[in-house]
């Protein structure tokens, strides 16, 4: 057991407000291959906005189950 990958151990998942737009922006940042997946996600979330929701992968505990 370790830190949950999806919420980075916070128990709160950053859910994009517009999934389609988020995906578009993420792909744009990812295309050159110069940024990490985490950095692409961070930048895309900043542009599109997000809501904090309870992480469904760790049930809000911040601890990976597998």
Image: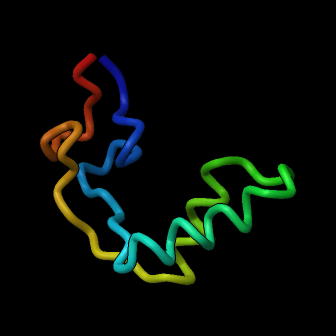
Residue drawn at 29 percent across, 75 percent down: 51
Q: Is residue 65 above or below residue 56?
A: above
Task: Please name whichever residue, 3 or 5, is drawn nearer the observer in this view of the structure.
Answer: 5
Viewer-side residue, 61 vs 36: 36
Q: How is the image coloured?
A: rainbow
Report whether 3 appears left or right of 12. right
- Considering the image in quadrants, where does the C terminus appear? top left
Q: What is the x, y in percent for residue 41? A: 57, 60
60 with respect to 9 (left or right): left
Q: From the image, which quarter does the N terminus lie in?
A: top left
Image: 33 above or below 23: above
18 on left or right of 30: left
Where is residue 58, by image quadrant?
A: top left
Q: Position of residue 18 (x, y in %)?
A: 38, 78
Residue 6 vertical placement versus 30 (above, below): above
* Front in this rendered view, residue 33 or 2: 33
The quadrant holding residue 27 is bottom right
Task: Tell me which residue sits at (31%, 50%) in the image.
Answer: 10
Q: Count numbered badges in the picture.
A: 0
Pick out the residue farthest to the left: 59
The residue drawn where x is 34% and y is 35% is: 4
Q: Position of residue 48 (x, y in %)?
A: 49, 82
**Image position, residue 55 (x, y; %):** 22, 50
Q: Where on the picture, by quarter, is residue 44?
A: bottom right
């Amino acid at each position: 057991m370790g830190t949950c990958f999806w919420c980075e151990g916070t128990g709160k998942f950053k859910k994009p407000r517009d999934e389609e737009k988020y995906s578009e922006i993420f792909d744009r940042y990812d295309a050159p291959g110069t940024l990490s997946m985490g950095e692409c996600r961070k930048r895309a979330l900043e542009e599109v906005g997000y809501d904090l929701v309870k992480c469904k992968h760790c049930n809000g505990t911040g601890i990976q189950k597998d």
